[in-house]
Amino acid sequence: MKKTFAPVAALLISVSILLTGQGLQSTLLPVRATLESFPTLAIGAMGAAYFIGFTLGCLKGGELVQRVGHVRVFLAMTAIASATPLIHSLLVEPVSWAILRMATGFCFAALYVVIESWLNERSTNETRGIVFSTYAMITLTVMALGQMLTLVYDPANFELFVIASVLVSIGAVPIALSTSPSPDKPQSVAIDIPRLFEVSPSGALGCLVSGFANGAFWALAPVYTLSISGGTSLAAWFMTSAVIGGAIGQWPIGLLSDKFSRRGTLAATSIAGCVVSIGLGLSGPESSFLMINLLGAVWGAFAFTLYPVAVAYANDHADPHEYVTVSSGLLLMYGAGAVIGPFIASALMTYLDAGYLFTYAATTHGLLAIYIIFRTLRPEQTAIDTPITFSDALASTQTASPIYEEESLQEDLE
């Protein structure tokens, strides 16, 4: 175990600190925007702006790494991502915040490119599953911790913005001082979306729907909780409950997808997400604190596992040499959904009711389930003899691009 994690220990420590700051921002900004009486549409636009920047970072992050290397990109992106929370506290205005969120999204996408390609290169086929599962658990756990930090100070003041900035800055230190060699620069960063739909339309649409629902959740869930309680405490607890539920749900649902039908698991997860979303959409001020958080945890267990199952299902149908392009394409599908989702959900919340955030999520999950069931009833075109394991698929489920895996794959084939 020590040999497995020694090459990536500094990187995982950096990730833990860095994403704690990111988790704090993800809850702080919608809460503060609501306190500042930003229109719900503007808050939704801020969430969409983050994912626009994120998508651009996915497209350009590999090129940056190819040009200057992992460490320089990591340090540059953390410097910019550290500055943005401070500027948020100085320019409390919707347009400025949307621009800053776009910059933050770009930075974190590029950081994920560095992080995940680094993990890929420093792990082997025998250790990649445990390395990436550890990375996934760290990511969700520290983001939950960061969200709870919103309870430390009043979101209406500047202290939480400073804490977010400090955490992102300190996250660069372990990498900057690490003696571990950095990975080689990538040789290819190609993405092929049309081929993605040839490989697995259900997997591609699963990632798109995950982006629709999750992008709206990250942007607007604090607004939903404020409509229920009128205070910021529920927002922090609700977001944390959802993230913890997502962390806990990864392996049980992943195990089901390994042992039984991957497509069936994808449909069942969508149906469960639809049902829980309806429950949250119908909840109101009369709902108890405990009930809202329990529903949030169950929602996270299904909503945050939809994407990994969809990725695993798509990779089941891909040829080994296509894993890189398929994974990158799925990530872009998620990003596209996450750009559109906050706009639709914020419009529904503005003109109807805050609970329509989850009515919208129920609709997207339900439509995906109907589509998968329809395809299940059709005769199978191809049979999958040996599905890839869910844990191996985690190397493709996070955010960036396992672009370096292509070189090692070619070496294995030789």
Image (cartoon, helix red, strand yellow):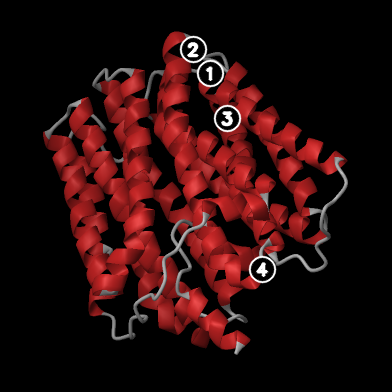
Disc 4 crowd, CA 10 A, few/some/many (<14, 14-19, 20+): few
Q: CA distance from mark 3 to mark 4?
A: 46 Å
Q: Is residue 170 left or right of residue 214?
A: left
Instruction: State the residue lying farthest toward the top.
Output: 351
Note whether 191 is above or below 49 in the view shown.
below
Q: Nearer the viewer, residue 243 or 273?
A: 273
Q: Could you tell me residue 411's position as x and y percent?
A: 55, 87
**Camera-side mark, 2 or 4:** 4
In 3D space, how far apart are the residues under numbered discs 2 and 3 (Cα atoms)? 22 Å
Q: Which mark is residue 353?
A: 2
Q: Looking at the picture, does residue 29 appear above or below residue 305?
A: above
Name the mark on residue 356: 1
Question: Residue at label 3?
Answer: 290
Q: Identity of the amino acid at label 4? A: Asp
Image quadrant in which you'd find residue 9: bottom left
Q: Earlier in the sequence, mark 2 or mark 3?
A: 3
| Mark 2 → mark 4, Cα distance in angstroms | 46 Å
Asked if disc 1 and disc 2 are in contact, CB closer than 8 Å, the reply is yes
Q: Earlier in the sequence, mark 2 or mark 4?
A: 4
Dot label at residue 326: none
Report the amino acid beneath label 2: Asp
The answer for how far apart the CA atoms under marks 4 and 1 are is 40 Å
Disc 4 target residue? 319
Is 342 left, or right, of 34 in this rendering? right
Which badge, 4 or 1, comes first in the chain's sequence? 4
* Circle 1 Cα neighbour tier, 10 Å, few/some/many (<14 / 14–19 / ≥20): many
Q: Amino acid at mark 3?
A: Leu
